[in-house]
């Protein structure tokens, strides 16, 4: 059985994995990292029914275009973001701070942020990513964190380790 995953069609400008970050390691030369907009990061996990420090995808200005493969999954977008859900060639304009369901073959097109820099994509569950020093937060300048410290790239596969369902999600 193939693991549920997103295929990155367009990576966006600055799309990385983030959580609450690495703290108290600067004396070892490891810089602080974590979500740039803590409020929207925490809201995304709360809406998804996740624990507070569950990793999410953070994007700046323009987000990714992702194609979903696998069982149904719930997700939400937080921030002031324009995004569309594409289901069997039907485009649905999404609303931030609401939960939606993706099914096999659906696409999520995160177009842009408005009057803010950052937005967040949380799934109900966990991405299959590596933690370093109790965090998955990506710091691209230091090349540490999930995804080998890099931004998401075109044609990359983002595996989903596990998901849980929410009864209140929209289709």
Image (tube, rainbow, N blue to C red):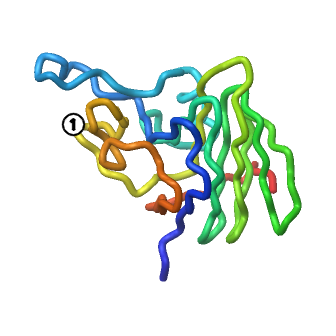
Report the label total: 1
Residue at 59 percent of width and 71 percent of height: 70
Location of residue 1 with respect to 60 vertically, above or below: below
Residue 57, percent from left and from top: 52, 41
* Image quarter in which the C terminus is found: bottom right
Residue annotated with mark 1: 133
Residue 99, percent from left and from top: 72, 45
Specify whether 137 is left or right of 14: left
Specify whether 94 is left or right of 11: right
Quarter-of-image position of residue 90? bottom right
Specify whether 96 is left or right of 123: right
Residue at 68 percent of width and 71 percent of height: 104
Location of residue 171 with respect to 47 vertically, above or below: below
Specify whether 28 is left or right of 100: left
Q: Residues within 10 Å of mark 1 (few under 14, many from 20)?
A: few
Q: Nearer the viewer, residue 10 or 35?
A: 10
Label 1 sits on a secondary structure element that is: loop
Residue 144, percent from left and from top: 27, 38
Residue 95, percent from left and from top: 80, 37
Q: Nearer the viewer, residue 65 or 129?
A: 65
Quarter-of-image position of residue 69? bottom right
Residue at 69 percent of width and 43 percent of height: 110
Location of residue 48 with respect to 46 vertically, above or below: below
Location of residue 66 with respect to 121 vertically, above or below: below
Q: Residue furthest bottom?
A: 1
Residue at 28 percent of width and 38 percent of height: 143
């Amino acid at each position: 059985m193939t693991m549920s995953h997103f295929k990155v069609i367009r990576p966006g400008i600055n799309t990385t994995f983030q959580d609450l970050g690495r703290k108290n390691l600067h004396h070892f030369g490891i810089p602080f990292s974590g979500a740039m907009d803590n409020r929207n990061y925490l809201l995304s996990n709360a809406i998804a029914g996740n624990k507070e420090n569950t990793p999410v995808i953070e994007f700046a200005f323009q987000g990714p275009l992702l194609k979903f493969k696998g069982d149904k999954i719930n997700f939400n977008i937080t921030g002031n973001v324009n995004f569309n859900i594409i289901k069997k060639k039907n485009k649905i304009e999404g609303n931030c701070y609401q939960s939606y369901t993706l099914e096999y073959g659906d696409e999520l097109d995160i177009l842009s942020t408005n009057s803010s820099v950052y937005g967040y994509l949380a799934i109900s569950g966990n991405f299959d990513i590596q933690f370093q020093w109790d965090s998955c937060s990506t710091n691209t300048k230091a090349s540490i964190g999930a995804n080998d410290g890099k931004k998401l790239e075109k044609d990359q596969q983002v595996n989903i380790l596990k998901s849980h369902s929410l009864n209140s999600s929209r289709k």
